Amino acid sequence: MKKQNTIFRIVGMLAGTILFCLAGYAQEKRQVNVIVDAIPLSSQFKANEPFMFRVSIYNGLKDEILFPTYALMPNGWGGESANFTFYDVIQKSGQQSLISWRREPINVPPTVSGMASYRIKPKEKLYIVVDAKKDYATVNWFPGEYEFTVRADYISVDRYTTMSVASNPVKFIVE
């Protein structure tokens, strides 16, 4: 009887461990299939030049989604980056340190009436080129490898739902 109870306990603990591991695995997978990715447009950036990234928003949903922005390419006042946030900026070279980016305000010209919402059809991407440095000009960029995360905000899924989606960490090098 004791031996049987011990076997049941061991089997129960193993089953619990397997279920716990599977639950952890399920949380690692995306729940919503909208993916944000950013790719540097240069293999290395110079500290005194723009940091250009091509940000893509992929729609893996069955219906179209909308992304509001002032521009799809850099302009003189930063309109292309209005609904993007860059965060978790880490300098990887040498001693790892977190850099605090303070976003500069976007000064929309009085001749611009508002943002446009760009449609992203199912299984398609919208590409936006962003100068990440222009919006965060207060950072002192030292030579080395950096990493950050970009988040696209105010993605409209339907008339009731908007969401923000973060990218995987993006790596880049400053000379």
Image: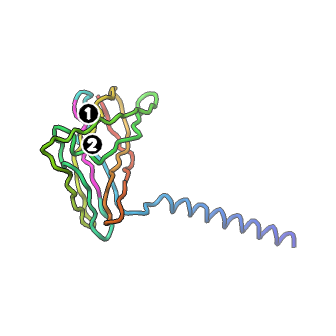
* Crowding at mark 1 (Cα within 10 Å: few <14, some 14-19, many 20+): some
Dot 2 lies on which element? strand
Q: To which quarter of the image does residue 169 belong?
A: top left
Q: Nearer the viewer, residue 96 or 1?
A: 96
Q: Position of residue 87 (x, y in %)?
A: 38, 41
Residue for point 20% across, 49% down: 70
Residue extending farthest left? 111
Q: Position of residue 38 (x, y in %)?
A: 30, 47
Which residue is under mark 2? 40
* Crowding at mark 2 (Cα within 10 Å: few <14, some 14-19, many 20+): many
| Residue type at tag 2 | Pro
Q: Is residue 153 on the magenta stretch?
A: no
Q: Earlier in the sequence, mark 1 or mark 2?
A: 2
Which residue is under mark 1? 45
- The answer to whether the residue labelled 1 contacts the one labelled 2, judged by CB atoms less than 8 Å apart, is yes
Separation of residues labelled 1 and 2 (CA atoms): 9 Å
Residue for point 30% across, 31% down: 174
State whether the magenta stretch is mostly helix, strand or loop. Answer: strand
Q: To which quarter of the image does residue 162 belong?
A: bottom left
| Residue type at tag 1 | Phe
The magenta segment is 49-57
Q: Position of residue 143 (x, y in %)?
A: 33, 27
Query: Where 137 sits versus 171, above or below?
Result: above
Tag of residue 161: none
Q: Nearer the viewer, residue 29 or 65?
A: 65
Dot 1 lies on which element? loop
Q: Is residue 25 left or right of residue 30?
A: right
Q: Quadrant of the N terminus?
A: bottom right
Q: Quadrant of the C terminus?
A: top left
Q: Is residue 56 on the magenta stretch?
A: yes
Q: Position of residue 126 (x, y in %)?
A: 23, 56
Q: Is residue 68 left or right of residue 99?
A: left
